[in-house]
Structures are given as C-alpha cells and as structure tokens.
Image (cartoon, rainbow, N blue to C red):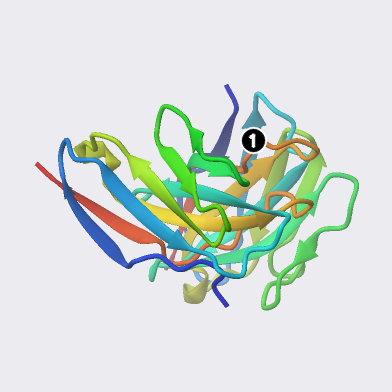
Amino acid sequence: DAKTTQPDSMESTEGETVHLPCSHATISGNEYIYWYRQVPLQGPEYVTHGLQQNTTNSMAFLAIASDRKSSTLILPHVSLRDAAVYHCILRAQGTGSKLSFGKGAKLTVSP
Amino acid sequence: GALVYQYPRRTICKSGTSMRMECQAVGFQATSVAWYRQSPQKTFELIALSTVNSAIKYEQNFTQEKFPISHPNLSFSSMTVLNAYLEDRGLYLCGARETGGNQAPLFGEGTRLSVL
C-alpha cells in the first residue's frame, strides 16, 4: 500500500534541469515528504525533505504543492553522478527512523 | 557532520550459519535505529525499529529469534542473522536518527550478505 506514486524512470542529459514528480494524494497533516537517492551497492543518500514550504539545499530544490498532494524534486544542471534511483517517501512525526520505501524512480543521465 | 557506518560491507556465510552486522552513528545520537533488507530484486523490507530504552518492534515476517538486535547506547546497534539461508541474501541497511528534532534518518552503506 504505497502512499506515494512516482514514474518508474526518467531520462535526462548532462546539464539539464530535471523535475522528478511525486504524488501523495492521501498525505496526512503530520507527514513530512522525504527524498532519498540510491546508487547500486550503496545505502540511500538523503537529499532533502519538507513539510509545507518549498525547501532548497546544495543538492536540490523541493517544490511542494499548496494542497501538499504532490511534490517535485528539482535537480539543477544534473551530472552523471546524479544518476540514481530517487525515492519519495512520507514519514509521520513520532515514527523514529522508520521509512517505507517503494520502487522509486530511476533517473538516467546521458553525456 | 553526521554519518552512519556499517560493517562489514560485505560478507559471505555458509547456509545454516549466522552473521552479525554492526551500525555506528557518528556526530549525532542514534535514538532510533531501523534495520532494513533490500533484496536482489531491489525491494525494501523493514525488519525492525529500535528505540533506546524501548522495546524493539519487529515487522511481520521478521522475528527476534531470527534477527536479534542490540541497541545498547546512542551510537551503536547490531543485528545478527541467525541460521542464514538463501532467502536471507541481500543488502542489510541501518537507518538512524535522533528523535525530538527534524533530522532526517541517515543510512549506512549497508552490509551485503551472500549465502552459500
């Protein structure tokens, strides 16, 4: 019973700005939106998270819809190192480090 | 900065034997630690959630008898896979965070278990 929906895969070219969508129509008021990425043979790497306001850090910009039912992870000027499976996950306050991973979206970056 | 280390990174064990893996948090207090298994088919399974000074909560299909977990302090946790068989193969991941704040759970690189 996945609570988020992402495309299976997306393709991009180096230097492009990539928009990774995530739908979470049944999100609860106390659930944060987390994004992680994972490359083969390594653990998930934290990218960003937000509750209601858009957030930005050195890795990405997270745009959250005003109704919070969807969000978009924006990766500016992607490089080959950004190729990974990106996971959009909801985590409720008080659930510790428990996260429910789905299949994620595989981002391919071409030279 | 805050980091999570897992070791060993890779291990091979004979069918029916046991394997212990460790998780070390650096730069923050790992109040909550979750252990996951990522299968060769890439799906994630939550094994258990451990919070210091609280009982460890195992998910359905995972038991303490098979995957005993220790979380003795705010920087360390270990898990053992007892009587490992082929279906126990996979990447075992430790995710930790400090509760009470807005910190995101951080993951180690994982321990890759192969069973012969």
The residue under the point 89% across, 52% down is B54
**Residue nearest the viewer, comparing B32 with B115:** B32
* Crowd band around label 1 with a 10 angstrom C-alpha radius: few (<14), some (14–19), many (20+): some
Which structural element holds mark 1? strand
B96 with respect to A109 (left or right) = right
Q: Residue furthest front?
A: A66
A60 with respect to A70 (left or right) = left
The chain holding disc 1 is: B
Residue B91, placed above or below residue B108: below
B19 with respect to A109 (left or right) = right
Q: Residue B69, located in which quarter of the rendered image?
A: bottom right
Q: What x and y, as percent, mark residue B72?
A: 82, 41
Q: What x and y, as percent, mark residue B45?
A: 56, 67
Q: What x and y, as percent, mark residue B1?
A: 57, 21
Question: Is residue A47 at all visible to an observer of this figure?
Answer: yes
Question: Is residue B107 at all visible to an observer of this figure?
Answer: no
The amino acid type, in three-letter code, at marker 1 is Gln
Q: Residue furthest right?
A: B53
**Residue nearest the viewer, comparing B116 with B45:** B45
**Residue nearest the viewer, comparing A1 with B110:** A1
Would you name the residue on which mark 1 appears? Answer: B24
The residue under the point 63% across, 46% down is A51
